[in-house]
Amino acid sequence: MPDVVVIGAGHNGLIASIVLARAGLDVVVLDQLPWPGGMAGWHVVGGVEVPVGAYVLGLIPMDLLEELGINIEQYKPDPIAVYVKDGELVRWWKDLDKRIAEFNRWGLGDELRAMWSKIVEFHRALRRYLYRTEPPSREELLSDPVLSEFLKLRSRDFLGRYLPREFWDMFIFEPYLDQPAFMVGYYNPATDWYYPAKDGEVGMQVFARELYKKAISSGARVILGLGVRKIIIEGGRVRAVITEDDRRIEAKAVLSTASPINTVLELVGEEYFDKYVIDRFRSIPPNGAYRVVIVYDGKVRMRGELDNYRDSILQLPFGETVVHNNYLIVTGLPTRDELENYVDIDWGRVKAFELITPQDYERLFRVAGGNLNHLPMFEEFMFDKRPVSGWGYKTPIRGLYLGGAGTWPGGQVTGIPGYNAARRIIQDWPSLRQ
Ligand SMILES: Cc1cc2nc3c(=O)[nH]c(=O)nc-3n(C[C@H](O)[C@H](O)[C@H](O)COP(=O)(O)OP(=O)(O)OC[C@H]3O[C@@H](n4cnc5c(N)ncnc54)[C@H](O)[C@@H]3O)c2cc1C
């Protein structure tokens, strides 16, 4: 009998399993998918390994990767990103002075410098609260002089202090404009976004593979392609999980890194939770992403000047687009005409085409509403309210923990929920083992 069953071999589940196994606990990780990494994993389209979800890293702290022994390099093209603003290119260079010069084309260099130094300060301040096994409340964060500004201002007011409206999409998605400027800080890592790389190979698969290998070498047993159907509660505490092939695996603790909504409503069952929790989870509207993948017979070429920046993260009007040699992925749903405006494409040379819809993501990852952060990254689901006020990583059911993107600090590839949740279990272990 393992000590802990981890549901989900996404990046948070794998990180949790490394921390738990290193602490000497017997850990089994189960994932219904056949690949490791979950939304940060990859699959093969037209013979090429392409990311299924996440394609860049930036929010996972380097010191966390070091502590876990994950040795990946950061591949940053220069410019890192290129934003297409009314047909003009705005290049986000690696070097800060070059960025300032770029923004000076619109007379906005000083403003950009001031805004960026605020964002750098934000991340420095946030670090003090990241590795908490009890998530901080909004009130606690408000007591921090740097963070309080990001909590009190809306994203639109923060951005509006520095830049005209036409630049805002470079820094935040539209739905976050009325959310606290905390989200602008969160989504703009001070170290910038990068592609994981190792030994000349560039792409998200490098990161997922390294995590998977590290989980196994740390002693965790990772079983892919086997889902959990039910979490069994007996005598007020977690006793076991039932797998989809009807095996019962007993454990002292279960850590679910799947969506909290699916964990509560499907795997455990409504009857174990207060009505307000069920109402809260049932009322979350769907919010998913589209993904278009094109695998080409030859190098993918962009039109005009954009072709010089093929390697960069391309912020195009229909969605972020990344190109690697012979494939292109768009997180968005361009029409054929829109795509052809930017990509020099001969459809006769397309080897494979894939469209993933929000409904596909919902089914694929078993994530309610297709939400790529498991829960919305809106104020009512942030800080110690993520997923539910008073829970943090520990649910009211003894032995049942949560540690995926639906817990503090939130979604994207940060690794912090899995890391903190595992440490929380280790803290509680003396009482859990009884
Ligand atoms: C299209 C898209 C683009 C994105 N781009 C980026 C990006 O570039 N950078 C970034 O940082 N973030 C990005 N994200 C968000 C990021 O990928 C996710 O927030 C993050 O990977 C979530 O990690 P996780 O480990 O918490 O959860 P997941 O990756 O969702 O892992 C949870 C795992 O649980 C498994 N599971 C669910 N139910 C069960 C069950 N009953 N039994 C067994 N296993 C189960 C799932 O199969 C899944 O593998 C993107 C997401 C998407 C979808």
Image (tube, helix red, strand yellow):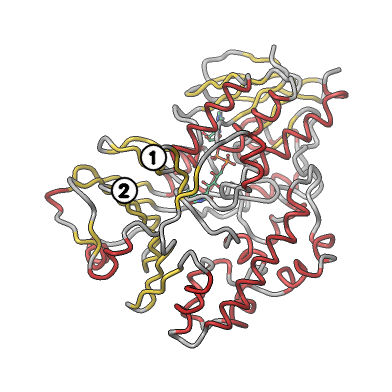
Relative vertical location of residue 407 with respect to residue 47 in this rendering, above or below: below
Q: Which residue is drawn at 70% across and 56% down?
A: 382
Relative vertical location of residue 45 with respect to residue 106 in this rendering, above or below: above
Contact (Cβ within 8 Å) of mark 1 with mark 2: no
Location of residue 308 in the rendering, given as x and y in whole percent from the top left corner: 29, 64
Seen from the viewer's position, the closer of residues 81 and 405 is: 81
Amino acid type, callout 1: Glu
The disc label shown at residue 293, or none = 2
Give the farthest residue toward the left.
348
Q: Disc 1 to disc 2, how far (Cα)?
A: 19 Å
Asked whether, in this view, residue 44 is left or right of residue 190, the answer is left
Mark 2 burial class by Cα count in 10 Å: few <14, some 14-19, many 20+:
many
Location of residue 124 in the rendering, given as x and y in whole percent from the top left corner: 71, 60
Amino acid type, callout 2: Val
Residue carrying label 1: 201
Seen from the viewer's position, the closer of residues 352 and 355 is: 352
Asked whether, in this view, residue 116 is left or right of residue 97, the answer is right
Seen from the viewer's position, the closer of residues 195 and 418 is: 195
Q: Residue at x 63, y 78 (%)?
A: 114
Q: What element carries label 1?
A: strand
The disc label shown at residue 314, or none = none
